[in-house]
């Protein structure tokens, strides 16, 4: 949202800045980008900062429809709100520029103060196994750049299928224990391409109410009849499937991306069987995290073969980019022709593919990474639980810290940033209205002291705002 050069705009008044622009205070030198480098300071008195200007409950729903005949008619009122929210000391805190790898400590540019905040404890990135910056992965990426150059320069059905790309598909099918796998440019396009490639008008798709936007968009594009069942509620799924005699597809996620809870897969599988519905599981956040071999939640429940279609992304645990669908060979052949988001889009860049192959090799060879991730996730759940922090239903490495205050969450987010924690506020449309939260991602790479320090900062700020006892 803010990768539009506004970092250089004149920002908040000097009184809101902790460190002089010449970088002389606290011994930090000015950053090369003209921002002032500033280390997180626990001693920084957050109360001295003026409250964020213009906090409001406005969100995208206020700007969806507009009167008049000009499609541009909505732009001016939206722009007014947007400028107020994002620029010149506004309250939005999205898309802050990161000047480092998405490791456990990161460097974040603060457009409001022109400071570069260094050494922030990172709970925002999905780098669950810390693989995006592993030296072996970086080496593989660099080798591939030298051999193949930057891009694939073609759709996978034409010239874009590099040998690396084929290998990735084969190795993913092997890892998932399926007959075939198909690679997509992103996890988003995997859902869109698969769902709209397989389902037709007159068919029925029933998805969990909290399904990711890419699932919803695939449903819309398919023009099949779309229904949603109450979150993780097999009884409601049963009701939604009743009385429909045509082709049926049920869609769930392994770990829900914004709630961190796990699909009640055994009961859902039973309901699907009862109604003769096919089942798709999106394991974006659970592949390489759950199951004895890291295949995901389906493997965790011993239901790998009962689930018809397995989908995932390479942008989370493998730290790269891309998506995959794994399943029976005939499904893969069919999607090669009908998944338009893949057919009509460029193949993954070879350096990314090479990085993914190396990351996959490491994830398979080092199950201890998964153990460490689970130790860390349990430890953080323990720290937050002891302090009485409301984590909703989360039980996984995705921990939602419930705030339930759509306007107020930005003030808390800013305090966290200033005190040394980088974690993203999540609100409508990513979650329901009045269900705003911080979405915390735990990584195998976090150290115990980072988890403890981060939890202490979060808990003290939540207490300040009356969000935990
Ligand atoms: C459940 C789910 N599916 C799909 C995606 C899309 O994946 P990608 O970011 O690789 O496009 C996400 C991304 O957050 C997700 O959470």
Image: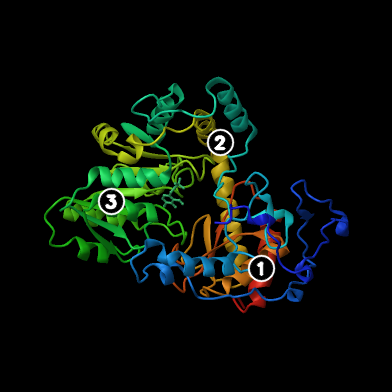
Q: Earlier in the sequence, mark 2 or mark 3?
A: 3
Q: Tell me where residue 390 appears, x and y as whole percent.
A: 54, 71
Q: Which residue is nearer to you in this view: 92 or 356?
A: 92
* Element type at mark 2: loop
Q: Quadrant of residue 411?
A: bottom right
* Left or right of residue 75, residue 460 in this image: right
Q: Residue at 65% x, 69% y: name it.
A: 459
* Element type at mark 1: loop
Residue bearing the label numbered 1: 89
Distance from Cα at disc 1 to Cα at disc 2: 45 Å
Residue bearing the label numbered 2: 366
Number of on-image labels: 3
Q: Quadrant of residue 140?
A: top right
Q: Earlier in the sequence, mark 1 or mark 2?
A: 1
Q: Residue at 51% x, 73% y: name it.
A: 406
- Mark in the foreground, 1 or 3: 1
Q: Tell me where residue 366 appears, x and y as whole percent.
A: 56, 36
Q: Tell me where residue 21 appears, x and y as whole percent.
A: 82, 58
Q: Is residue 265 above or below residue 150?
A: below
Distance from Cα at disc 1 to Cα at disc 3: 39 Å
Residue bearing the label numbered 3: 221
Quadrant containing the N terminus is bottom right
């Amino acid at each position: 949202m803010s990768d539009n050069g506004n970092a250089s705009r004149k920002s908040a008044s000097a009184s809101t800045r902790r460190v002089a622009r010449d970088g002389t205070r606290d011994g930090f030198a000015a950053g090369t980008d003209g921002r002032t480098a500033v280390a997180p300071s626990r001693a920084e008195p957050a109360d001295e900062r003026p409250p964020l200007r213009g906090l409001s409950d406005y969100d995208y729903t206020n700007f969806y429809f507009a009167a008049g005949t000009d499609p541009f008619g909505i732009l001016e009122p939206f722009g007014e709100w947007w400028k107020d929210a994002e620029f010149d000391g506004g309250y939005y805190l999205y898309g802050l520029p990161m000047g480092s790898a998405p490791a456990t400590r990161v460097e974040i540019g603060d457009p409001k103060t022109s400071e570069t905040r260094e050494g922030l404890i990172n709970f925002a990135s999905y780098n669950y196994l810390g693989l995006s910056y592993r030296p072996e992965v970086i080496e593989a990426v660099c080798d591939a750049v030298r051999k193949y150059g930057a891009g694939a320069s073609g759709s996978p059905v034409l010239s874009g299928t590099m040998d690396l790309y084929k290998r990735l598909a084969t190795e993913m099918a092997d890892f998932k224990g399926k007959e075939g796998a198909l690679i997509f440019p992103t996890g988003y396009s995997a859902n869109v391409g698969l769902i709209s490639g397989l389902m037709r008008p007159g068919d029925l798709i029933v998805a969990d109410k909290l399904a990711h936007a890419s699932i919803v968009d695939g449903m819309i594009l398919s023009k099949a009849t779309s229904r949603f069942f109450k979150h993780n509620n097999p009884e409601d799924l049963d009701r939604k499937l009743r009385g429909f005699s045509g082709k049926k597809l049920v869609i769930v996620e392994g770990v829900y991306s914004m709630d961190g809870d796990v699909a009640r897969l055994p009961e859902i599988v039973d309901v699907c069987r009862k109604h003769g519905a096919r089942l798709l599981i999106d394991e974006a956040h659970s592949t390489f995290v759950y199951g004895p071999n890291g295949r995901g939640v389906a493997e965790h429940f011993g239901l790998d073969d009962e689930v018809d279609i397995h989908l995932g992304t390479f942008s989370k645990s493998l730290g790269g980019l891309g998506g995959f669908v794994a399943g029976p060979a005939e499904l893969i052949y069919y999607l090669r022709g009908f998944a338009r988001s893949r057919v009509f889009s460029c193949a993954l860049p070879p350096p990314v593919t090479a990085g993914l192959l190396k990351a996959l090799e490491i994830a398979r060879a080092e199950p201890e990474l998964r153990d460490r991730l689970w130790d860390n996730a349990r430890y953080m759940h323990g720290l937050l639980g002891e302090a009485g922090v409301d984590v909703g239903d989360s039980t996984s490495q995705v921990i939602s810290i419930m705030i339930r205050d759509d306007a107020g969450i930005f003030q808390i987010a800013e305090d966290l940033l200033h005190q040394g924690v980088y974690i993203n506020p999540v609100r409508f449309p990513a979650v329901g209205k009045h269900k705003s939260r911080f979405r915390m991602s735990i990584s195998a790479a976090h150290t115990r002291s980072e988890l403890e320090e981060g939890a202490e900062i979060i808990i003290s700020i939540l207490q300040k705002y009356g969000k935990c006892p």
